[in-house]
Image: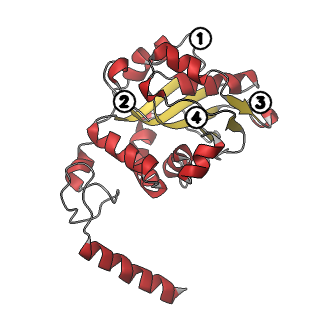
Amino acid sequence: MKIIAFFQRQFDDLLQLLYPPLCLGCRTIIEERGNIDAICGKCLQSLTPVPDSYTRQEVLSRLSPCYLEELFCAFQFDDLVQSIIHEIKYRKAPKLARQLASQARSYIIANVPWLEKDPVIPVPLFRLREKERGFNQSRAISEGVFAGSENPVYDDILFRSRPTQSQTELHRDERLQNISGAFTLKHPERVKNKNLILVDDVVTTGATLNECARILKEAGAEKIWGLTLAAPLKPLEEAVTG
């Protein structure tokens, strides 16, 4: 095994020499690897936090009824974060999802008082889409944020029971209709009387997280908090998410 690992490292070094990695943000060669392989240090420092008041004023207040206690988003969904999310989803890069989530971890811990040891539930993909992609990015994000914590990750409770149209091209009312009834719950006894943390990659209207929270609360869950890596700070009709 040590010999295989040695040759794997040699092969990786050769690939980097022949095809040096380019930063997803500025498209320059990454001279030194940081916490995120695909981003240079300068672009990494440019990741911008979402203001504390934004999700409450622009997302939660527009949900009626709202089933989420609070919603925290780490980074603004700008061109750089959009490129990273696109790379994660469409170039099948779960490692990148975990790295971005790990980068957000210290900021999340410093600003989110409700992490505790509560169970984490990644927003599920429809089974055929997950099979096609090879992973669920929300699960990878959960692993990055909660690595080393005592928060258990439940990915065998909430399921997407039917395929849904991408929320990207839909307006608010269409998003609500598109996602309504799209989730089912197994083992409801595992969420009864518990506080839970829902994790997704990007939030715009909050329709997906709120629908998941509704299902969980109807099964007896107490409080539901939402946690995402990004949110677009622009008019919802102009926002582009995955």
Residue underneath mark 1: 65
The residues tagged by marks 2 and 3 sit, at their Cα atoms, a distance apart of 35 Å
Residue displayed at 43% across by 85% down: 6
In the image, residue 1 sits, relative to residue 154, either above or below, namely: below
Along the horizontal axis of the image, is 25 left or right of 83?
left
232 and 49: which one is in front?
A: 232
Residue displayed at 62% across by 42% down: 117
Query: Quarter holding the C terminus?
Result: top left
Place of residue 177 in the rendered image (x, y in percent of width and height, measured from the top left): 58, 17
In the image, residue 23 sits, relative to residue 57, either above or below, namely: below
Q: Counting residues from the N terminus, which is met first, the one under dot 2 or under dot 1?
A: 1
Residue displayed at 36% across by 18% down: 237
Q: Counting residues from the N terminus, which is met first, the one under dot 2 or under dot 3?
A: 3
The residues tagged by marks 3 and 4 sit, at their Cα atoms, a distance apart of 15 Å
Crowding near the residue tagged with mark 3, few <14, some 14–19, many ≥20 C-alpha atoms within 10 Å: some
Identify the secondary structure beneath mark 4.
Answer: strand
Residue underneath mark 4: 198
Q: Check if mark 1's residue and mark 3's residue have beta carbons within 8 Å.
A: no
Residue underneath mark 2: 240
Residue underneath mark 3: 192
Crowding near the residue tagged with mark 1, few <14, some 14–19, many ≥20 C-alpha atoms within 10 Å: few
Q: Counting residues from the N terminus, which is met first, the one under dot 3 or under dot 4?
A: 3
Amino acid carrying label 3: it is Lys
Q: Check if mark 2's residue and mark 3's residue have beta carbons within 8 Å.
A: no
Along the horizontal axis of the image, is 35 left or right of 136?
left
Identify the secondary structure beneath mark 1.
Answer: loop
